[in-house]
Amino acid sequence: DPRYKDNVPSLIHSLERDRKMREYKRTLVDAMLLAFPSDSGATVEAQGRGGGGGGRQRNQGTASTSEGRVSMAEMWKSFVSTPQQTAAPAAQMERLIRRQHFTNMVEQYVCTRLHVMNDGSAPFNFWVSKLGTWPELALYALDVLACPAASVLSERVFSTAGGVITDKRSRLSKDNVDKLTFIKMNQAWI
């Protein structure tokens, strides 16, 4: 919730503040990396480029003789070694770039003064307004803040009555729910 962002450091003991804040930021970046996997098309394109035209290098290496023939050893060597050498660094570089992008986004959010939230605005509206500035962070926050319009699911999770009322028995009256809750809570003594 952005309204309480500035209060988080004050809630942590001063000796652990920097370490905990780094840990919270790293956890958020890791969660965003899981929530937003890289585009498979971009990965394939990066692997095809090989960080510097790996496909072109392979073609140049195979057309080595003046007659256009390629020795079997050269063809086998380029077939086996080139994809492994170019694909791994490209994928690793992409992961590092994405991690740095998300880290910068989180740092910008943490360093930004949020005077907009002082009026008690809803955090959902804040994150919708930040979709252009921090797109992945805003989408992740909206996903975390979003909840179903009905309270039935949360009541089932956070109340004892949620364990009594099921889909099959969703039309119980209040008196019956109270009785069933009492029975369930005192089942050990019955």
Image (cartoon, rainbow, N blue to C red):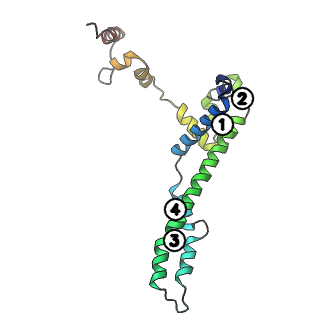
Going by the numbered disc 1, the residue's amino acid type is Ser
Place of residue 172 in the rendered image (x, y in percent of width and height, measured from the top left):
32, 15
Name the element at disc 4: helix
Question: Rounded to the nearest whole Å, what is the CA distance between mark 4 and mark 1?
Answer: 33 Å
- In the foreground, 11 or 107: 11
Residue 34 vertical placement versus 59 (above, below): above
- In the foreground, 3 or 150: 3
User: Which residue matches tag 1?
Assistant: 129
Category of crowding for the residue at label 4, using alpha-carbon neighbours closer than 10 angstroms: few (below 14), some (14–19), many (at least 20): some
Place of residue 50 in the rendered image (x, y in percent of width and height, measured from the top left):
57, 66
Relative side of 160 to 145, left or right: left
Question: Rounded to the nearest whole Å, what is the CA distance between mark 4 and mark 3?
Answer: 15 Å
- In the foreground, 95 or 17: 17
User: Which residue matches tag 2?
Assistant: 116
Category of crowding for the residue at label 2, using alpha-carbon neighbours closer than 10 angstroms: few (below 14), some (14–19), many (at least 20): few
Which residue is at a point 31% across and 11% down the rendered structure image?
Answer: 180
Going by the numbered disc 4, the residue's amino acid type is Val
User: Which residue matches tag 3?
Assistant: 82
Which picture quadrant has residue 116? top right
Question: Rounded to the nearest whole Å, what is the CA distance between mark 3 and mark 2?
Answer: 53 Å
Question: Rounded to the nearest whole Å, what is the CA distance between mark 1 and mark 2?
Answer: 11 Å
Mark 4 against mark 2, which lies toward the viewer? 4
